[in-house]
Image: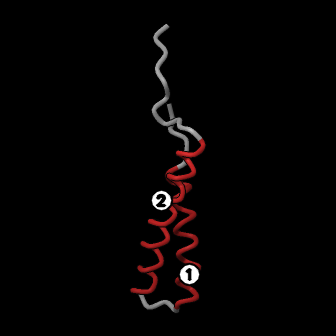
């Protein structure tokens, strides 16, 4: 009778917007860090892609109960 809504569940649009935001943050942080460390631009773009992917996976992982 005391049912509480899961605070980590959200609508599909909210999940989509959250993944867009965190992918931009992850790509920016990792991409510019790669450039700062002296990587070439092409390699920094690849690093930014993996940074974006890692940020989205980190944010969308399931919480353990």
Q: Residue at x 42, y 72 (%)?
A: 29
Q: Residue at x 57, y 46 (%)?
A: 13
Q: Residue at x 54, y 48 (%)?
A: 60
Residue 58 percent location from the top left of the image: 51, 54
- In the displayed structure, 60 sits above or below 8; it is below
Secondary structure under the numbered disc 1 in the rendered image: helix
- In the displayed structure, 15 sits above or below 2; it is below
Quickly name the residue at label 2: 21
Between the residue at mark 2 and the residue at mark 1, the CA separation in whole angstroms equals 18 Å
Q: Quadrant of residue 49?
A: bottom right
Q: Nearer the viewer, residue 58 or 15?
A: 15
Camera-near label (2 vs 1) is: 2
Residue 14 percent location from the top left of the image: 53, 45
- In the displayed structure, 48 sits above or below 18; it is below
Q: Nearer the viewer, residue 50 or 7?
A: 7
Label 2 environment density (alpha carbons within 10 Å; few <14, some 14–19, many ≥20): some
Quickly name the residue at label 1: 45
Label 1 environment density (alpha carbons within 10 Å; few <14, some 14–19, many ≥20): some
Q: Give the mark, 2 or 1, whose residue is nearer the N terminus.
A: 2
- In the displayed structure, 31 sits above or below 60; it is below
Number of the label disc, if any, that sits on residue 16: none
Q: Nearer the viewer, residue 46 or 12?
A: 12
Residue 40 percent location from the top left of the image: 52, 92
Secondary structure under the numbered disc 2 in the rendered image: helix
Outermost residue to the front: 13
């Amino acid at each position: 009778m005391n049912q509480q809504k899961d605070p980590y569940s959200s609508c599909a649009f909210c999940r989509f917007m959250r993944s867009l935001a965190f992918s931009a943050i992850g790509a920016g942080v990792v991409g510019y860090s790669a450039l700062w460390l002296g990587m070439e631009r092409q390699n920094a773009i690849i690093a930014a892609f993996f940074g974006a992917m890692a940020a989205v996976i980190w944010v969308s992982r399931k919480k353990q109960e």
